[in-house]
Amino acid sequence: MQANKFKTVRSDVQDLLQQAQDLFAEATEATGKKADELRAKGQDVLNQALNVAQSAQTAVVQGGRELASSTDDYVQANPWRAIAISAGVGLLVGLAVGRSSDHY
């Protein structure tokens, strides 16, 4: 679910940046008041893209904090289980690295 949200945000930001790029390209060909209007629209689009990106960053940071907090709570409540899980993961990584080095 989170991956879909981030793909959507990325797509939205890319679309906004493309719009801004198009507006600025058009503004270079225009003169006077029309050019000023196009540059202002381009700046507004860039600000929208920045706001979307900042919102996504805030969501990611908040999600990371919640994950770290829940992990800390789990480890505090189940220290021996956490040690066993860590040892198991370490063993699996060690086996994987050992096997991959045998092929070289």
Image (tube, rainbow, N blue to C red):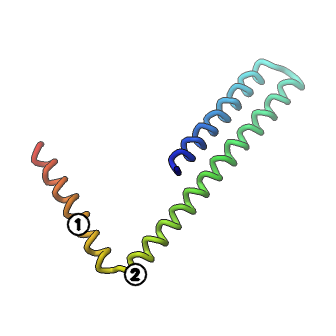
Left or right relative to 92: residue 17:
right
Q: Which of the marked residues, 1 or 2, is nearer the chain's N terminus?
A: 2
Residue 61 image label:
none
Neighbor class of circle 1 (other Cα within 10 Å; few <14, some 14-19, many 20+) is few
Image coordinates of residue 10 in percent, x first then y, are 58, 41
* Marks 1 and 2, how far apart at CA: 19 Å
Quadrant of residue 62 within the rendered picture: bottom right
Q: Name the residue under label 2.
A: 77
Image coordinates of residue 8 in percent, x first then y, are 59, 41
Q: Name the residue under label 1.
A: 88
Image coordinates of residue 41 in percent, x first then y, are 80, 33
Please determine whether, in this image, residue 30 is positioned above or below residue 44: above
Badges 1 and 2: C-beta atoms under 8 Å apart?
Answer: no
Task: Give the residue furthest to the top.
Answer: 29
Please determine whether, in this image, residue 61 is positioned above or below residue 46: below
Quadrant of residue 79 within the rendered picture: bottom left
